[in-house]
Amino acid sequence: MSFKPRALPRPSLLRRRVRLRQLELLAAFERTRTLSAAARSVHLSQPAASKLLHALGVDLGMRLFERAGRTLRPTAAGQALIRRAATVIGNLERTQAELEAIEGGQVGLAAVGAGMGASYVLVPKALVALLDEAPGLTVEVREGPMDELLALLRGGRLDMVVGRLDVALIERDLVIEELYDPPMCVVAGPQHLLGKARRPSWSEVLAQEWILPQASTPMRNGLEEVFRRQRQRPARCFVESSSIQTNVMLLGERDMLWVLSADIAARLSQLGLLRILPVGLLRGPAPLAIVHLRDRALSPAALHVTRCLRQAGRAISQSYKGLARARA
């Protein structure tokens, strides 16, 4: 009996035709949105860039761009290539950084995007554990709005994102692991008289000057629901801000009230930067979660970071549950 060797699958047309330079140009186009700017960012002349893209379209037998006035606009096929090219180039850059970290004697490298809600307690607590458990591992932390961080994640520049994920941002390409869901506290500066009251009423609380979260945010929507239930709004609210740094400093300078996530409020209260008013805990806007891409496996370094985030999440959850019992 004889056996025929099994034929190896042929590389796809894209793998056979596409060049790294073309991928770099497409990835740059996603950032800059114009061919001239994309060409400059990869050190090409505009005619050379046009020639590269035209050649790729001919090789694939597809129209990748169409002219709209004096600019080029990607077709549906072009948009798909641009999106994937950005991921490929981002992955290569991340791999290069990881190789350099290993060559420098480090265990590995992980890049974490931290939303505002995760930057004050969750991520620092996880990093403390990580430094003890894996001192040779390097972690890059980038803070920012969740939509921007998710774009960096899809572009291959982050391994994971940690924070509160708005329902509008959830898509099928994301794997979401919820860690904990902290409620919200009403907080005041350390000098505020209500901070020393045993149990102020909602009427007293709403008679104060307030800092409100920015309009249309999940936190603002939740707070507006509280006001509706109380059938009363704050007497004065001239500042709308979601900046934790700004608001904490403002509470320290002026008698105002604000709402803040219970985990962050408990930590800042321990530091003497604010007081938590005993008026009950409010439902938070969304759980804190770890987010990564479904089609990209996490590196050993990134997996180690996720384990530390889970441990930190469990510990923090117990701490604010203790706060809820103390305030009951």
Image (cartoon, rainbow, N blue to C red):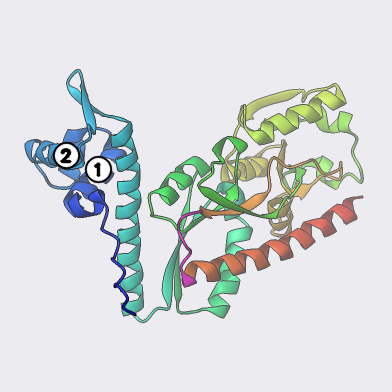
- Is residue 297 in the magenta section? yes
Depth order, front residue of 241/106: 106
- Residue 272's tag is none
Location of the N terminus (image quadrant)? bottom left
Residue at screen point 29% across, 73% down: 5
Looking at the image, is 241 positioned above or below residue 110? above
Crowd around label 2: few <14 · some 14–19 · many ≥20 (10 Å): many
The residue identified by callout 2 is 53
Q: Going 58% across and 71% down the picture, which residue do you hit? A: 128
* Left or right position of 242 against 106: right
Whichever of labels 1 and 2 marks the residue nearer the N terminus, that label is 1
Q: In the rendered view, does 217 fall on the left or right side of 72?
A: right
- The picture quadrant where one finds residue 315 is bottom right
Q: Which residue does the image show at 44% across and 51% down from the upper left?
A: 153
Picture layout, residue 61 above or below residue 275: above
User: Distance between the Cα atoms at labels 1 and 2?
Assistant: 8 Å
The amino acid sitting under disc 2 is: Leu
The mark found on residue 26 in the picture is 1
| Foreground of the two, 161 or 219 | 161
Relative image position of residue 326 (x, y in whole percent): 89, 56
- 27 relative to 191 in the view: left or right: left
Camera-nearest residue between 83 and 263: 83
Question: Residue 2, position in %: x, y?
Answer: 31, 78
In magenta, the rendered stretch is: 294-300
Q: Are marks 1 and 2 in contact (CB under 8 Å)?
A: yes
